[in-house]
Image (cartoon, rainbow, N blue to C red):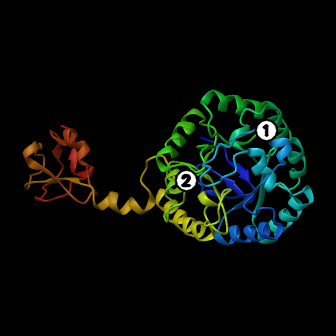
Amino acid sequence: MPRNVVLGRRTMTPTSRPYIIAEIGVNHEGSLELAKRLIELAKEGGADGAKFQSYKADTLASKNSPAYWDTSKEATRSQHELFQKYDNFEPEDYAELARHAAECDIDFLSTPFDDAAVDYLEPLVPFYKIASADITNTPLLRRVARTRKPVVLSTGASNMDEIRWSVQTLHEAGATDVVLLHCILNYPCENRNAHVRMITGLAEAFPGYLIGYSDHTVPDPDMTALAVAYSLGAVVLEKHFTHDKTLPGNDHYHAMDMHDLRRFVDRMATIADILGEESAKAPIATEDISRLNARRSIVLARSVRSGQVLAESDLTYKRPGTGVGPQEWDRVIGMSVTRDLPDDHVLTWDDLRAT
């Protein structure tokens, strides 16, 4: 079984209700006040963590880095140009956001994209999130792992060998707890490309690890992609978050808002109740009365005399299941009865003896 992992204020298990990350990213568009408001909205919606992205365009992308997103939604064609629009936050700004998150009683999170970010985030975040694009980034993985904090690793656009290599690299550098998120690195991701069944593949390939899902689909009223992912075993769920889904560009167009989040959290509570905590098939306590009364017993089809050897024609099966069960049918045939018994009598072992 996967080991339990402490993520912020919660201890996560394979049967936990999901840890929900509201991925604010840079949807604050450089405004510290809006960033604080987004933290408040994430808490109001029911998220466990409010996450940002900590980077500087000059250390993240060369000036000749082409777009990999839908340019009909975000027209900027240079990664460097886009990232430079919203990289004005400094370490002291993230510290202020972390204080605000603490006041709001929500975990403060941010994805580091360079060594400096790893270092200044270390006293601020309870665990690190590593973006899919950095799954092969040896120095960044090692820098994060050396903090010995839990790591949530997105696996978008990666194959199993790369994931295994990344997990090994993290462990060798000091990381103890690693959570793997299925992700499709499309912005946005069409439903037909979400492939959430890959969650089960990750769980099979990494049986000792908790699995989650980072979603880039356009949210529908039922938040279907996230709901299905949770049903398949994803216990950490991440989705971009905004205050206004109608805003152009950046990550607003495939983000959820507070209303989506609240509706989803409520739905997850229902799904969690339906899923339950046990995966091994076994009767539960509320089924005890059903096992007793809805199952069958071997019942006499006609009256019999003491000492009579039972033939199959003497027997039938009826409810309740308080007597000898019909799984003992073959054993009971050929036994004799210890006393006179009427028809419709529910046989018990006291009524029988071997011949």
Residue 288: % across, % down:
39, 60
Q: Which residue is nearer to you in this view: 283 or 269? A: 269
Residue 126 visible somewhere in the drawing: no
Residue 46: % across, % down:
65, 68
User: Furthest-right residue in view?
Assistant: 92
Residue 340: % across, % down:
12, 55
Quadrant where the N terminus sits is top right
Give the structural element (helix, strand or loop) at label 1: loop
* Residue type, mark 1 in image: Ala
The numbered mark, 2 or 1, whose residue comes first in the sequence reads: 1
Image height check: is 70 above or below 172? Answer: below
Residue 22 visible somewhere in the drawing: yes
Q: Residue at x 76, y 30 (%)?
A: 169
Image height check: is 215 above or below 158? Answer: below
Label 2 Cα neighbours within 10 Å, binned few <14 / some 14-19 / many ≥20: many
Q: Residue at x 68, y 56 (%)?
A: 250
Which residue in the protein does label 1 denote?
175
Q: Is residue 35 left or right of residue 209?
A: right
Number of the front mark, 2 or 1: 2
Give the structural element (helix, strand or loop) at label 2: loop
Quadrant where the C terminus sits is top left
* Residue type, mark 2 in image: Thr
Which residue in the protein does label 2 denote?
217
